[in-house]
Amino acid sequence: MSAISLSEQVVVDAAAAAPMLAQVEQWSAVNSGSRNLAGLATMAGLLADAFAILPGDLALVDPAPVDAVAADGQVVPLLHGQHLHLKVRPDAPVQVLLTGHMDTVFAASDSFQGLRWLESGVLNGPGVADMKSGIAIMLAALTALERSPTAASIGYEVVINSDEEVGSPASAALIARAARGKVAALTYEPSALPDGTLAGARAGSGNFSIIVFGRSAHAGRNPEEGRNALLAAADIALRLKAASGVTPDGRGFSCNPAKIDGGGPNNVVPDQAVLRVNFRPRTPADEVAASALIDRVIADVALEHDVLIQRHGGFGRPPKPMDDKAERLFGLVKRCGADLGLPIAWRDTGGVCDGNNIAACGVPVVDTMGARGGSIHSHDEFLITDSLPERARLSALTLMRIAAGQFDNNGGIE
């Protein structure tokens, strides 16, 4: 830690001393599943109170309108919670974006609601790693940054959305606006591995509902007059899966047909079905190829089965390659970690997050600045509590050095 200046040491120590564990325990006791609007409202209020300690303009922003395809093929509105948005010193010469999410994958009806210690320093509970601890780390770093002599040189926007776990459909536009003009971004997903390894390049993700309209008929008397929508949907699924794949050099796209809604009594030819399918393209070109495949398969199946087909959805998470700007930002974080005695490494992953969307705006982002933990999205989710002060120090130092001009996304490290 000899490379850290005295003024930096004061700030990183202040970040580490923040009451992060108490905040995680309080926030994780609130169920904020992505569809639990009441819980999300409670969580948004708690976060607004906590982030009010920072200067700037804070608001709870209404979600953008979103629709979805119901099981019967009807397109219906889909409600989401409000998002927290904070803007501090928008006229400062250096601007950064920090993002997180208040929602979890655990519904209000899920049995996984409480906290328990698995062992000393290992806390189990819904959202403890993904990512209520990350929000606490972000707040600790920003609060400490305000004590830094470089604070006046840096402005920032904070977006904590309510819908990240369902693809950020109601917050993507807000994130894109907040990313404008930013030299860098930090997102507070948990580390890719419990040892603190960060996520590097990420695949993209697209979710689609393919609606098939056939024609009903009696399955015994006149089945030839029917047009089986369920069979056509299954044919689409098989064709999409057969045409997908990832090459040994990491190009291409995977396809996961996940569900078919539709059908009815055994003696009726089903006239409606909805295929739910997810694609994970590795590069922007792969995303284009996957989209073209969907259109081609839909056209072929519609013709061969004599049905009508509608495509709904899209690629909400663009692929996030590790480009030169991202490598330079990762390099800065790695050097900050080294000065703090923290080894920092990264690896590519097929998972997605808001970092995908930020990178697509041309802003370099390190999107796993949150806590160390693991088993996220399961009842075994855990947080390693020693990582709270560790990661708060890392964020505070990274922000101070960005503020001091030690990074720009055109020329790299100065």
Image (cartoon, helix red, strand yellow):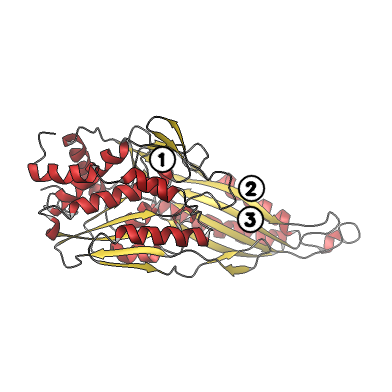
Amino acid under disc 2: Leu
Q: Residue furthest left?
A: 6
Residue 28 percent coordinates (x, y): 44, 48
- Between discs 1 and 2, the one toward the N terminus: 2
Amino acid under disc 3: Leu
Q: Which residue lies furthest to the top in this view?
A: 119
Does the CB distance between marks 1 and 2 fall below 8 Å?
Answer: no
- Between discs 3 and 1, the one toward the N terminus: 1
The residue mark sitting in front, 2 or 3, is 3
The answer to whether residue 401 is seen in the rendering is yes
Provide the secondary structure element on which disc 3 rests.
strand
Residue 238, numbered label: 2
Amino acid under disc 1: Gly
The residue mark sitting in front, 3 or 1, is 3
Provide the secondary structure element on which disc 1 rests.
loop
Residue 275, numbered label: 3
Which quadrant would the N terminus be assigned to in this image? top left
